[in-house]
Structures are given as structure tokens and as C-alpha cells.
Image (tube, grey):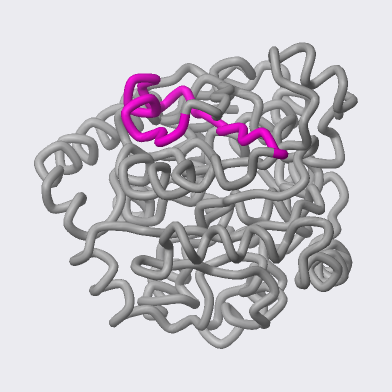
Amino acid sequence: MKYFIIAGEASGDLHGSHLIKELKQLKPNAEIQAWGGNLMQEQGAVIKKHINELAFMGFVEVLENLRTILKNFKLCKKQIKEFNPDTVIFIDYPGFNLRMAKWVKKNNYKSVYFISPNVWAWKSSRAYKIRDYIDQMIVILPFEKEFYKKYGVEVKYFGHPLMDAIKNHEKTSFEEFCTENNLSDKPKIAVLPGSRKQEIKHILPIMTEIVDKFPEYEFVIAGTSTIPIDLYKQNIKSENVKLLFGKTYDILANSTAGLIKSGTSTLEAALFDLPQVVCYKGGKISVAIAKIVAKVKYISLVNLILDKPSVKELIQNDLNKDNLIQELNNILPKGENYQAIKADYNVLFKLLDSKDIYKNIARIL
């Protein structure tokens, strides 16, 4: 069996790596080529395009890189034709993958889409494209089953894959975590500013501007290999910050609270039972367009799944030093929102609990 997997971001690389591991157990001789990252490569995929070259964020940023994106479409089609896979697997990355899905269908390749685009948030008409172009849709949010049913799309839901990933994470003790990473014995504040260059520029300076207001804590940034270390250094506004690469789950597991960029990381923080403030700031034009077309009340997955403002969301101008100080104080152990967030997380765990999601998907494939 031959599979071609397309993931364009760090989260897709993570999910893809778990899926490849299960595929290889069921089909040891499976050939896998992919657009992905180091994690997928470690599980045996031949990486044809690295995610370091693929992450473009926002309407304006996409327009600025349009020529590169068009070249990527052409390259991807060429690689699929040359490889001639039995199945093409799309993982998230909807701006690129939905367009590729149309071509894949036209050229008679089987297709599976794992992790639905946020069609329920905007451009719900894309659900018809999924119905027409995708052979099997696998969703990871409980409310997506009912959403797709309205558009005549039968989907599979096995729970959320992060539950499996986090359950299987080997947690080190706080003392080991500090010793191994040359950290102090102070309690930690996790800082997750995102995995794109634009996010580091817009969000990290504000997150680290408040560090010196909390001297009893040590702030630890979860760095990603897709971002040059110099870009982090240019946007860190305090000397009292530690930067660790490849340690995101260890940081979340050993922290008291978190400053988390909106996206998958908000759910990861919640599943580690970590009280958080959700942060987002982007280019003015891109955000203005997003506000016009968005159909949802919240930007964090935690609030969307629970359908209530459980965690505080600081967006655009609301993401400033004063607000961030206030909201972080509110979620620390003696803060007024600490217990409420913990109670909401218990509900979240029950909604998303899963068993062997990657194994189930591998069986379908």
C-alpha cells in the first residue's frame, strides 16, 4: 500500500506521525510520502516538502506569498502523479488541502480527510466540497457530526486525538523537568506564542512584557523548530524568560498556568488541566476580514466545545499588558477563576475522551 500525506503545520506533523506509526504496525511494508515535518520523517515517511516552507497565516500574508503557494500546488500534483498512491490523506491545512482535494478526486485517487476544516466557523459552503471531493471525513470535535449531517456528509468520530497523545505522554517529575532543562525551582508559567513567524512578532512581545510583574514564577516559552531562534530573541521583552525547544508537553505538564495562543494549543493546555489565558493578535486587515466572515462566538477550542466563555480570550487590542496581568492573576491558584476553569475542564475531558483513535483511522485506511 502507498499513501501520500499532506500536512502543512506543526500540529499536522504531530498527528501525521502518530497515524504513520499505526499504519506501519498494520502494514509494515507500506510506502509513505508526505508533506510534513521531522516527526513524520522519524516514523518512516519520505518528506517531499517540509512544513518549515509552508505556514502562511492570514488573508494578507497568503496574498503576499501567492506565487509560492501556486508553485506548491503544481509541485504537489507532480509528486502525487509520480508516486501514484493508493490513498491521499489530508490533515487539516484547509486552504491548501481543499483545493488539492478537488484535483485528487478528478484524478481518481482515493482520499481521506483527517481533522476537518473549520467550516462551521466560516464558509460553511465548503461542506459541499468535502461531500463531493472526499471519500472519508474523520472529525475530531463532537459537534462536527451533527454539523456535517445537515450537508449530507457521513463522518467518523473516534474522539479527539490529543486525548491519546496526552495520555501516552511520559510525564517527568517537576524536579526532573527543572534539572534536565537548567531551570529554577520556581513554579512555572507556560508561554505558547504559536508556530508561525507572524505570531511570534505580534504575540510574544506582549506575553513576555508582563514577566517581571510575576517574580515568584518562572516563565518558560515552548519554542518550535520552525522558528529561527533569533526571531524569538528579538521578540522576548524580559531577561527572566527561558526558551525550550521540543518540550511543549513537558512545559504544559509542569506549569501552574499558561499564556496560550489561540489554536490547537488551547486544547492541549486544557487537557493537561492547565488554567490559561488565550491570546491572539494578528495583522489588522486579516483580523478585520476574519471578524466579518466568522460565524462563531469564540476563538478558542475550549470555549467552542463547551459553548461557554470558560477561558478568557484576549484578542487584538484587548491583548495588552494590563489585561494580561489581570487575567493571569485570575487563573493562578488563589485567583477568582481558578476553580471554575478546573471544573469546566472535567466536563471537557468527558466530551473528548477517546481510545485508540489513530489505530481506528489506520484500520479505515
Q: Nearer the viewer, residue 100 or 211?
A: 211
Judge whether residue 152 can be spotted in this image: yes
Residue 284 against residue 221 in the figure, above or below: below
Instruction: Examine the image and state in which quarter residue 29 appears.
Output: top right
Q: Could you tell me which residue is drawn at 35 percent across and 34 percent down?
A: 235
Q: Residue furthest bottom?
A: 150
Q: Could you tell me which residue is drawn at 24 percent across and 58 percent down?
A: 283
Residue 124, position as x, y percentages in the image: 41, 79
In the rendered image, the quadrant that contains the C terminus is top right
Q: Nearer the viewer, residue 103 or 251?
A: 251
Q: Could you tell me which residue is drawn at 39 percent across and 30 percent down?
A: 51
In the image, taking residue 356 as reference, residue 304 lies left or right, namely left
Residue 278, position as x, y percentages in the image: 56, 60
Residue 14, position as x, y percentages in the image: 60, 34
In the rendered image, the quadrant that contains the N terminus is top right
The magenta segment: 216-238
Residue 151, position as x, y percentages in the image: 51, 83
Residue 149 against residue 175 in the figure, above or below: below
Q: Nearer the viewer, residue 4 or 328?
A: 328
- Whether residue 45 appears in magenta in the rendering, the answer is no
In the image, taking residue 333 as reference, residue 308 lies left or right, namely left
Judge whether residue 81 can be spotted in this image: no
Q: Could you tell me which residue is drawn at 84 percent across and 44 percent down?
A: 356
- Whether residue 221 appears in magenta in the rendering, the answer is yes
